[in-house]
Image (cartoon, rainbow, N blue to C red):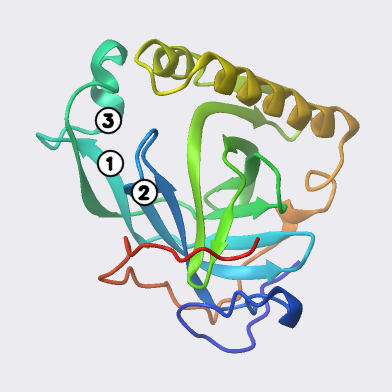
Amino acid sequence: MTGETTHMREGGRNDRAGGGWAAGEHILWRYRGNATDTFHICRPVTVVQDSPELLAVWMAPGTTCVKPVLADGTPVYREPLATRYTKPRGIIRARWFGTGVLKLARPGDPWSVWLFWDRGWRFRNWYVNLEEPLRRWPHGVDSEDHFLDIEVYPDRSWAWKDEDEFDQAQRVGLLGAEQAERVREAGRSALELVRSWGAPFADGWENWRPDPRWQVPELPADWNRSAPEVAQ
């Protein structure tokens, strides 16, 4: 698989009947903070494919993104788990270094699947990010992360990831008991695909490469604009 550009435009049509966004268009992939309506993660991405069955986007190396930090600027991952979700937070703009990330999402699924490579395009793993089903709007997609994730390796083995963060989020009230069980059930459903080696794992996306003509998307000044209600 290779990237195929028709034309480059920032933003998209979000017209499902008309085929959605075209390959090469720039959109935003955003996450709200848990239990808030405020966006704390924003990643400009390039559309690879947008069909009724799948949205695939590419986050290129060097992309300027928005990510959360503690109010004093400390990276979130450096804060001890006991206080990681209770200390005041802010956001910063930072470039995505290292290799890029291919993100795949099927409509209605409570997860997306990310592909990671090492340098030299040596495939590393798939990453199942458990989250709210993506909500589309004219300039991108929005979701809310659910802490728990699954790593899937080239030999088809897998492992739960961030279970400690998932448990801590429940302790501090970011996830209720019923929601936490729905997240676990979503993870079990995703693992059924892994065990049966269904889509997207069997679809050859690890052999995909971005179109070399694609430019790195820019982060717009109004990246945190409110998204209008759009039919999904």
Is 111 situated left or right of 148 in this image? right
- First in sequence, mark 1 or 3: give its number: 1
Q: CA distance from mark 1 to mark 3?
A: 7 Å
Residue 193 vertical placement versus 61 (above, below): above
User: Where does the N terminus fall, quadrant-wise?
Assistant: bottom right
Indicate the position of residue 203 as horizontal and vertical percent values.
Answer: 83, 52
Amino acid found under the numbered disc labelled 2: Ile
Is 101 situated left or right of 41 in this image? right
Q: Are marks 1 and 3 in contact (CB under 8 Å)?
A: yes
Foreground of the two, 177 or 47: 177
Residue matched to label 1 = 68
Check the image and name the residue furthest to the left: 72
Is 2 situated left or right of 86 in this image? right
Q: Residue at x 59, y 51 (%)?
A: 134
Q: CA distance from mark 2 to mark 1?
A: 7 Å
Indicate the position of residue 156 as horizontal and vertical percent values.
Answer: 79, 30
Q: Are marks 2 and 1 in contact (CB under 8 Å)?
A: yes
Amino acid found under the numbered disc labelled 3: Val
Foreground of the two, 107 or 102: 107
**Crowd around label 1: few <14 · some 14–19 · many ≥20 (10 Å):** some
